Amino acid sequence: MNLLLRTLFKLAGGLSRSGEDAYREDYDLRARTYESAETRPMLKQATKEFISGLGLRPGMRCLDLGCGTGYSSLLLDQAVSPTGLVEGCDNSEAMLREAEKLRAGALSVTRFARAEMLEFLGSRPAGSADFIGSFWAAEYCPLDRLLELVCRALDTGGTAAMLINTHESLSELQRTVMPVLFRNPGYIRCFPPINFPPDMQGFRRSAEKSGLAIERLEECSLEHRFRDASSAISWMRGSGPAAGLTAALKKERLDGFFYDVKKEIESKNGFAVTFRFLKFSGRKK
């Protein structure tokens, strides 16, 4: 998304009273299809590999911000059990119901709470966590405030880790959707706010300002190519990465919008999306 469009969407999202709830509404709608979305296996594998390299150990007190269906929370659980604790938060009640199903029947040190990430962090005592993670969710909060509260909640020497999309992530989707919206502005109901970090250097400045010493920070990418336009539309309507899209649109115009997007995709030579993201880990000084 170019600078002008990012500026317009950020401004509109700040002015839109319903924009703050758009992501929650969309995740509530997508909870049942979240784990079956076409790009989900790729992102789960990246999450698993990242968490396995963080040096977690039994007894650690962990927070999982924006835990969704609980996949990352249970990976943390496996690493810190039986004496540790994992607390996951998410603002979507439907996603947390899926997380409870995933946890059902397992011996677990994980518990879930419905809360926004900033609210959840603000409620934790200072220095009460050994590890705080956010995997594909940190971009839903203002980054400076999020990192400030993460650092506050961490004990000295505690670890923070994130997989976080940058504003160039899924740019192919943006380039496909925007012409449709420009031709048909009547599709739009609200503008979800945008908080993606601009790039690695911008993230570095925010992390260091918060009091976190960076141990790992790198730019990464993962690409997925859809077999046809119909599979791409199915992904847009049911996946986590495209959350906020349908909630931003008028419900009575959804079918027309996705029909137009499908035609836009069919006019191209195939369709792929690229997740562009940062891998970050750091310690509280």
Image (cartoon, rainbow, N blue to C red):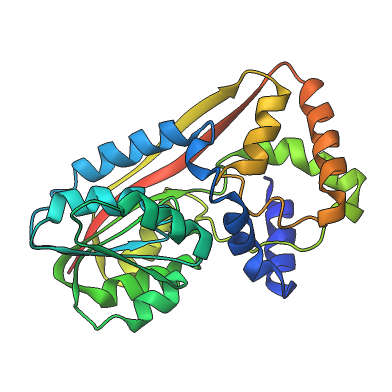
Instruction: Indicate the quadrant containing the C terminus: top left, top right, bottom left or bottom right.
Output: bottom left
Residue in the picture at 57% in, 42% down: 239
In terms of image quadrants, where is residue 159? bottom left
Residue in the picture at 46% in, 65% down: 143
- Residue closer to the observer: 231 or 4: 231
Whether 167 is drawn above or below 20: the answer is: above
Q: In this view, does 185 lie to the left or right of 215?
A: right
The number of callouts visible is 0
Direction front: furthest residue = 105
Q: Where is residue 175 in the image (x, y as percent from the top left)?
A: 72, 37
In terms of image quadrants, where is residue 24? bottom right
Q: Where is residue 255 in the image (x, y as percent from the top left)?
A: 83, 42
> Does residue 172 appear in the picture of this structure?
no
> Does residue 219 appear in the picture of this structure?
yes
Q: Position of residue 243 (x, y in %)?
A: 61, 51
- Residue closer to the observer: 78 or 268: 78
In terms of image quadrants, where is residue 261? top right
Residue in the picture at 54% in, 47% down: 32
Q: In this view, does 276 lie to the left or right of 129?
A: right
Residue in the picture at 69% in, 50% down: 245
Whether 93 is drawn above or below 227: the answer is: below
Q: Is residue 71 left or right of residue 79?
A: right
Instruction: Indicate the quadrant containing the N terminus: top left, top right, bottom left or bottom right.
Output: top right
- Residue closer to the observer: 14 or 30: 30
- Residue closer to the observer: 235 or 210: 235
Q: Position of residue 214 (x, y in %)?
A: 25, 56
